Image: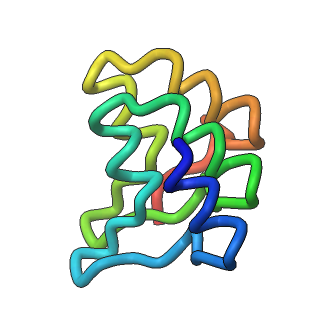
Amino acid sequence: MEVVRELLKHGAGVDIANTFGTTLLNTLAQFGHFEVSRELLNHGASVDMANNYGRKPLNISPVNCHVVVARQLLNHGNRVDIANN
């Protein structure tokens, strides 16, 4: 967490995606790192950014049984009534 906080303090981008369109929040939703995902969300990470396969973090976290991350995404404005685009 210290490294994440230090990077964010110095302006690290929270919504930068790799060549597959995967953001760090997508990856955290997959692996359940709720502390880091909370920090990114508190720094404005987008809950609605889909990867190149149309998967958003909220699509990924429940499939991998990461209920805490899914709850965080919902608490930060993720809507379940909007289809992936």
The single residue placed furthest to the bottom in the displayed view is: 19
Q: What percent of the width, then of the height, locates residue 57?
A: 45, 46
Q: What percent of the width, then of the height, locates residue 25?
A: 46, 52
**Colour basis:** rainbow
Residue 37: which quarter of the image? top right
Q: In this view, does 45 lie above or below 27?
A: below
Residue at position x 61%, y 48% from top?
82
Q: Is residue 3 above or below residue 73?
A: below
Residue at position x 65%, y 65% from top?
8
Q: What percent of the width, then of the height, locates residue 62?
A: 37, 23
Residue at position x 55%, y 47% from top?
2
Query: Which one is in front, 6 or 28?
Result: 6
Residue at position x 39%, y 52% from top?
26
Please indicate whether residue 41 sits to the left or right of residue 15 in the image: right
Q: How many marks?
A: 0
Q: What percent of the width, then of the height, locates residue 79?
A: 68, 40
Query: Which one is in front, 68 or 7?
Result: 7
